[in-house]
Amino acid sequence: MSVVDNLTRHASRLAGDVQSSLKRARMEGERRLLQRQHRSALEELGARTYELIHSGRIDLPEVAPEVAAVDRKLFELDAKEREIAAADTEQDAPSAPPDPVDAAFPMMGNHAPTQPDTSPAQHAGPGWDAADRFFRKNT
């Protein structure tokens, strides 16, 4: 068998595999779409049933525990929304006005001014010592 025949056979098999994969992916996508539509329809049914039960137009004692669970979750959701609104209000509330002195002189902070050290320095400091060593080494 020649190399060209072998390559043709592999390319043909690969093309078939790709088409099969695309077909399966399309079918999976359609299945997921149908599942979403089903969940949406169930959600609409549940919402409508909940409305009818609370309006008193239908009485279904069989679903009373589920209705009570929905009521509890709605109550908890409402409480959480109020808690969030209260937290937002607390954050938006102005704190104590800033001290104008602190704004004008931020380097002072809340500390009392200190006297500068007027004693003469004993030596130039670590930076100068390191520079002096560096330049002496290279000469």
Image: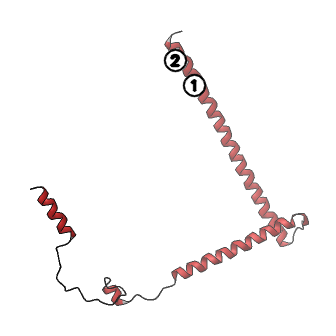
The residue at the far front in this view is 122
Q: Position of residue 37 (x, y in %)?
A: 72, 51
Q: Reply above or below: 94 against 127.
A: below
Q: Position of residue 23 (x, y in %)?
A: 65, 33
Q: Is residue 77 left or right of residue 56?
A: left
Residue 7: mark in rendering: 2
What is the C-alpha distance between the residues marked 1 and 2? 10 Å
Is residue 51 among the parts visible in the rendering?
A: no
Residue sitting nearer the eye, 98 or 29: 98
Circle 1: element type: helix
Circle 2: element type: helix
- Please give the name of the residue rendered at 51% of the width and 10% of the height, measured from the top-left corner: 2
How many C-alpha atoms fall within 10 Å of the one at disc 1: few (<14), some, or many (≥20)?
Answer: few
Residue sitting nearer the eye, 54 or 71: 71
Circle 2: residue type = Leu
- Please give the name of the residue rendered at 66% of the width and 42% of the height, measured from the top-left corner: 29
Q: Is residue 109 left or right of residue 71?
A: left
Q: Reply above or below: 35 against 86.
A: above
Q: Is residue 45 left or right of residue 131?
A: right
Residue sitting nearer the eye, 45 or 136: 136
Residue 26 lies in quadrant: top right
- Which residue position is annotated with label 1? 14
- Please give the name of the residue rendered at 12% of the width and 60% of the height, measured from the top-left corner: 135
Q: Which is more N-terminal, label 2 or label 1? A: 2
Residue 9 lies in quadrant: top right
Circle 1: residue type = Leu
Report the label total.
Answer: 2
The residue at the far top in this view is 1
Q: Position of residue 67 (x, y in %)?
A: 82, 67
Q: Which quadrant: the N terminus?
A: top right
Q: Position of residue 118 (x, y in %)?
A: 19, 86
